[in-house]
Amino acid sequence: MTLSPSSLESIQALIVGLALAGLLASAFEYATNRRASFRLLEAGGITALAALPMIAVVAPFIILRNTLRGRRFEHRPIPFVMVATMIACGWSLLSGQVALGMAHRLAGL
């Protein structure tokens, strides 16, 4: 089985996006002793505005963490878990492509 270059690039972007989301979520938890969550946006004002870029990158990690916890403790149905995982992976693919694009541009400087 061979993969096309575009498929390999997509897999790489997915992995980079998930790794970046996990790294930033862990760094946020380490720095603040709180878990990253979408509730940061409920604070309103400048706090929510400052949290928005971080949430945009960390969202796949938050979605996957909440989905797995919901399956384990609330016994959510498998189709719900599958859809949430597809959303998180799609989001991660996009954020990974942005991160890789920025890295290529910075490397070209």
Image: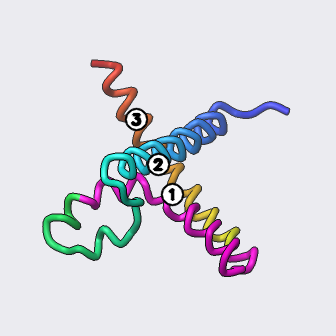
State how far apart marks 1 and 3 are (Cα). Answer: 19 Å
Circle 3 is placed at which residue position?
101
70 in the magenta segment: yes
Earlier sequence position, callout 2 versus callout 1:
2
Predominant secondary structure, magenta span? helix
Residue 83 vs residue 71, the one in the foreground: 71
SS type, badge 3: helix
Circle 1 is placed at which residue position?
60
Count neighbours of disc 1 (C-alpha within 10 A) and say few if under 14, some if 14 to 19, many if 20 or more.
many
The spot of residue 105 in percent (x, y) is 33, 27
| Amino acid type for the residue under numbered disc 1 | Pro
Do the numbered discs 2 and 1 sit on residues whose CB atoms are within 8 Å? yes
60 in the magenta segment: yes
| Amino acid type for the residue under numbered disc 2 | Ala
In the image, taking residue 23 as reference, residue 33 lies left or right, namely: left
The spot of residue 6 in percent (x, y) is 62, 36
In the image, taking residue 58 as reference, residue 47 lies left or right, namely: left
Q: Identify the residue at horizontal 29%, vertical 70% (top origin).
A: 41
Circle 2 is placed at which residue position?
21
